Image: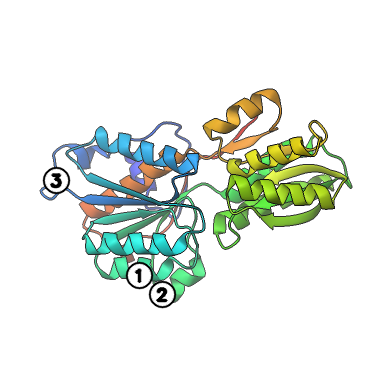
């Protein structure tokens, strides 16, 4: 990693424009550390292709740096299994890992167990879905966040959709888990774009990041609002569910669908037009940046209280 990028990792706000996974910093990687750190990557649902990509990116990174750190990866059965994710973090505390890189299922509910980890001397780095800043502050916690600006990413997708809409058109938003910051920010970004074109958001309902739930919500919206022109899904899983709902309603070509994440399963739908657009937030890179942030803190013997800030990772519009 260049000196410029390494300095940015601990600044208050960084725009990461690189598009390839970054190696460990040269100062850290010259020789194996006396104590090889054990890093736990704790994700959300591994049934979601996005998090499988994240896990694979982390494993590939460790594979290319085997002398520098050991990696443990964990995920939960579905996006709302917050209690089990808390238990996983507790298990990592008992296992005495050196760092936890966490993609929290809930922006508030995970904060108490994060505090337990920090109190146990474990470095914690937050990726993907940002922990609630106010709740962190109430616990006197500094937890660096590595991830995209979800509001800006969703607005890019919404702005592209807006070119196909006109003032007064009705649209629905299929939100992720409503207690998560990234779901809230993506909904806000979609609304920003719809407001600009004058489209009317007639419904916002949670699809809980899941295909089946997204399908059920989309079906209900299509039934309740027969003049609906578009469905904006907070992730690609829910967009896939929405595509099925549009087909079942006989409204292909009449109701546009957009998503977010650019998972492999969405690519054929982008190609044939079933999905108009999505956003790529580079899951593997988020894991790499999160791990590297943790390892840098460990190598510099920094305490959690000395860490803070945002490492903003890329998020790009994808239309084909």
> Would you name the residue on which mark 3 appears?
33
- Furthest toward the left, the residue is 34
Q: Position of residue 176 (x, y in %)?
A: 60, 53
In this rendering, the answer to whether 294 lies above or below 254 is below
CB within 8 Å, label 3 to label 1: no
Crowding around mark 3 (Cα neighbors within 10 Å: few <14, some 14 to 19, many 20+) is: few
The scheme the figure's colours follow is rainbow
Crowding around mark 2 (Cα neighbors within 10 Å: few <14, some 14 to 19, many 20+) is: few
For the N terminus, the quadrant is top left
Can residue 113 be seen here? The reply is yes
In three-dimensional space, the C-alpha distance between marks 3 and 1, rounded to whole angstroms, equals: 27 Å
- Furthest toward the top, the residue is 271
> Would you name the residue on which mark 2 appears?
139
Label at residue 115: 1
Q: Residue at x 44, y 34 (%)?
A: 18
CB within 8 Å, label 2 to label 1: yes
Q: Circle 1 — which element?
A: helix
Nearer to me, 79 or 163: 79
Q: Circle 2 — which element?
A: loop
Whichever of callouts 2 and 3 sits on the residue coming sooner in the sequence is: 3
Q: Is residue 45 found left or right of 222 in the rendered image?
A: left
């Amino acid at each position: 990693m260049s000196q410029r990028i390494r300095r940015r990792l601990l600044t208050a706000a960084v725009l990461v424009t690189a598009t390839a996974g970054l190696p460990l910093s040269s100062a850290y990687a010259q020789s194996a550390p006396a104590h090889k750190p054990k890093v736990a990557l704790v994700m959300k649902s591994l049934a979601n292709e996005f998090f499988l990509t994240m896990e694979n990116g982390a494993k590939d990174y460790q594979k290319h740096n085997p002398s520098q750190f050991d990696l443990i990866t964990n995920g939960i059965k579905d996006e709302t299994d917050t209690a089990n994710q808390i238990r996983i973090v507790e298990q990592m505390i008992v296992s005495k890992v050196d760092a936890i890189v966490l993609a929290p299922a809930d922006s508030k509910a995970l904060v108490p167990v994060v505090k337990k980890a920090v109190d146990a001397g474990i470095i914690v780095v937050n990726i993907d879905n940002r922990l609630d800043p106010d709740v962190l502050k109430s616990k006197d916690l500094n937890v660096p966040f590595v991830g995209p600006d979800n509001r800006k990413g969703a607005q890019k997708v919404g702005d592209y959709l807006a070119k196909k809409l006109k003032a007064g058109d009705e649209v629905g938003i299929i939100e992720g888990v409503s207690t998560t910051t990234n779901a809230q920010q993506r909904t806000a970004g979609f609304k920003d774009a719809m407001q600009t074109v004058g489209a009317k958001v007639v419904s916002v309902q949670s699809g809980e990041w899941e295909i089946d739930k997204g399908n059920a919500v989309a079906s209900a919206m299509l039934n309740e609002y027969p003049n609906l022109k578009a469905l904006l899904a907070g992730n690609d899983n829910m967009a896939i569910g929405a595509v099925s709902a549009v087909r079942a309603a006989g409204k292909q070509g009449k109701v546009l669908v957009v998503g977010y994440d650019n998972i492999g399963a969405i690519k054929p739908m982008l190609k044939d037009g079933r999905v108009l657009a999505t956003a790529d937030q580079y899951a593997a890179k988020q894991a790499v940046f999160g791990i590297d942030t943790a390892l840098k803190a460990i190598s510099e013997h920094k305490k959690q209280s000395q860490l803070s800030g945002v490492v903003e990772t890329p998020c790009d519009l994808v239309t084909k």
